[in-house]
Image: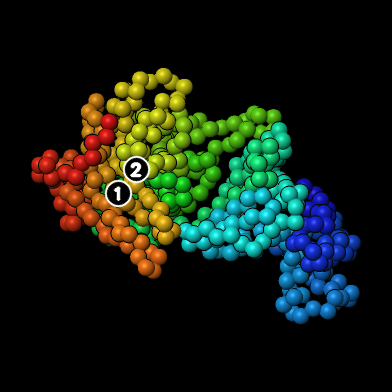
């Protein structure tokens, strides 16, 4: 999109009424005074600073008379409309906001601290919202229109953007912007009460002993955050390949190869799927494979990689419980273009998956690990999940928070032996089950 097109947006591109008219008026005056050719040579920060300076001179010369705060607000509004995303610009700069949800021009919601709230903001019209959406998707060389009414993309700044417009949406253009916080370590997550020290020591041992770990949970439970924290436990010197739909993981090791899927272009060509990348990663001599989310036929390739020498791999899956995660993995693997009997998929999962970590988002917005389970079954046996850690929640208290406690159970002997052979200590809080009766098992078929 040209600089002139970005600046010369319609008059209604502000709030309704006099305030919006003032913004439109000064945007037009700004366009008359700047040298577009010169502006295209400036970096984004320099361009914004130049526009703010020019606009300040215009307001000083022509009025209106404004207080210092009103003047700063007007300049910000005009420049945001000219170069940024208008009323969404301040929301993107607010570090406390993790998600922006625009449900048509009259309803803007955000998520802060795990809670969703509606803001007293609105777009002037559906047309203005569409122009903002078009500006966003143009930065990633995508387009949105009736022939292509859905877009899912990652912005250069890292946010994930999803757009769906009429006729698919009956409430006008819908825009969702998901922002990803900085990466957290497991110690920091302990500070947030997402897990405790004993669970941290256990997870550290499991990752370093090269157990294959599946992180499961519903949308917004913090799967990517936990996956990133767990990957931080992988020793330096190992070759790690990350595979994602939208690159969100921020691994700190030196030998990391990051792969990202690619949607089809406007002609419907050039589509590269997660499955394509998983298959290709097996030819890249990985020590560990980390898949941001398995959601289709790539589940089969991932399971085969886990059970054929790529131990210590990590992945996430959408599921409401550890048992559901196993069922979902089996269903996703069956979606592969390779016809594999369900019984064979069952055996493959028993061979590939070692640990399931279940995440839950509670009504107060807190995200916690609610279960760590070991898959202790083999071959054609029914799935046998052994719960080794669990969070027992209490009813919501008068302060609006959900409290509870973490509980620990003995590890299966086979798991303890693997930890021992990898020189990883067994946390004293857990211990080792000496008989099958001591295991906190959950049978899942």
Q: Residue 119 is drawn in which quadrant?
A: bottom right
Q: Is 18 situated left or right of 315 in this image?
A: right
Query: Residue at the location (24% across, 30% down)?
Result: 382
Q: Position of residue 348 (x, y in %)?
A: 31, 28
Residue 279 position, x and y percent, is 46, 30
Q: Is residue 352 left or right of residue 96?
A: left
Q: Does the residue at mark 2 contact the one at mark 1 (Cβ under 8 Å)? A: yes
Which secondary structure lies at badge 1? strand
Q: Is residue 144 visible?
A: yes
Q: Secondary structure at mark 2?
A: loop
Picture layout, residue 398 above or below residue 370: below
Please give the label number shown on residue 321. 2
Residue beneath label 1, please? 371
Viewer-nearest residue: 135 or 185 = 135
Q: Quadrant of residue 40?
A: bottom right
At a point 50% along the width and 34% down the height, the residue shown is: 274
Quadrant (top left, top right, bottom left, bottom right) of the C terminus: top left
Disc 2 to disc 1, how far (Cα)? Answer: 8 Å
Q: Position of residue 323 (x, y in %)?
A: 31, 38
- Nearest to N terminus: mark 2 or mark 1: 2
Label 2 crowding class (10 Å Cα cut-off): few <14, some 14-19, many 20+?
Answer: some
């Amino acid at each position: 999109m040209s600089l002139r097109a970005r600046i010369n947006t319609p008059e209604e591109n502000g709030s309704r009424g006099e305030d919006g008219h003032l913004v439109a008026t000064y945007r037009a005056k700004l366009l008359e005074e700047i040298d577009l050719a010169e502006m295209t040579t400036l970096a984004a920060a320099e361009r914004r600073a130049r526009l703010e300076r020019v606009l300040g001179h215009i307001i000083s010369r022509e009025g209106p008379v404004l207080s210092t705060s009103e003047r700063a607000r007007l300049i910000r509004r005009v420049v945001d409309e000219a170069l940024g995303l208008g009323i969404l610009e301040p929301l993107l700069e607010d570090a406390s906001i993790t998600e922006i949800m625009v449900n048509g021009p009259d309803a803007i919601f955000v998520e802060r601290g795990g809670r969703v709230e509606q803001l007293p903001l609105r777009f002037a019209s559906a047309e203005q919202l569409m122009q903002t959406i078009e500006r966003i998707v143009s930065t990633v060389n995508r387009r949105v229109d009736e022939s292509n009414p859905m877009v899912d993309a990652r912005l250069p700044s890292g946010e994930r953007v999803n757009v769906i417009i009429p006729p698919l949406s009956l409430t006008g253009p819908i825009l969702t912007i998901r922002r990803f916080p900085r990466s957290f370590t497991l110690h920091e997550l302990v500070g947030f009460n997402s897990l405790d020290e004993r669970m941290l020591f256990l997870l550290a041992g499991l990752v370093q002993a090269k157990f294959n770990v599946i992180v499961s949970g519903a949308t917004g439970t913090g799967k990517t955050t936990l996956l990133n924290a767990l990957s931080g436990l992988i020793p330096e010197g190992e070759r790690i390949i990350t595979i994602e739909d939208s690159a969100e993981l921020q691994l700190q090791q030196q030998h990391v190869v990051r792969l990202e899927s690619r949607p089809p272009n406007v002609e419907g060509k050039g589509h590269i799927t997660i499955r394509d990348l998983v298959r290709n990663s097996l030819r890249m001599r990985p020590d560990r494979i980390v898949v941001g989310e398995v959601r289709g036929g790539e589940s089969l390739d991932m399971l085969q990689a886990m059970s054929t020498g790529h131990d210590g791999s990590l992945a996430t899956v959408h599921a409401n419980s550890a048992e559901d995660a196993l069922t979902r993995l089996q269903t996703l693997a069956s979606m592969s273009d390779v016809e594999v009997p369900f019984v064979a998929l069952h055996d493959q999962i028993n061979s590939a998956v070692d640990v399931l970590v279940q995440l839950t988002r509670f009504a107060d917005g807190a995200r916690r690990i609610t279960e760590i389970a070991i898959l202790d079954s083999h071959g054609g046996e029914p799935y046998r999940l052994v719960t080794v850690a669990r969070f027992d929640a209490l009813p919501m208290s008068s302060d609006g928070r959900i409290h509870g406690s973490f509980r620990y159970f003995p590890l299966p002997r086979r798991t303890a032996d693997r930890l021992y052979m990898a020189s990883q200590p067994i946390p004293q809080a857990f211990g080792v089950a000496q008989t099958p009766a001591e295991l906190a098992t959950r049978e899942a078929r």
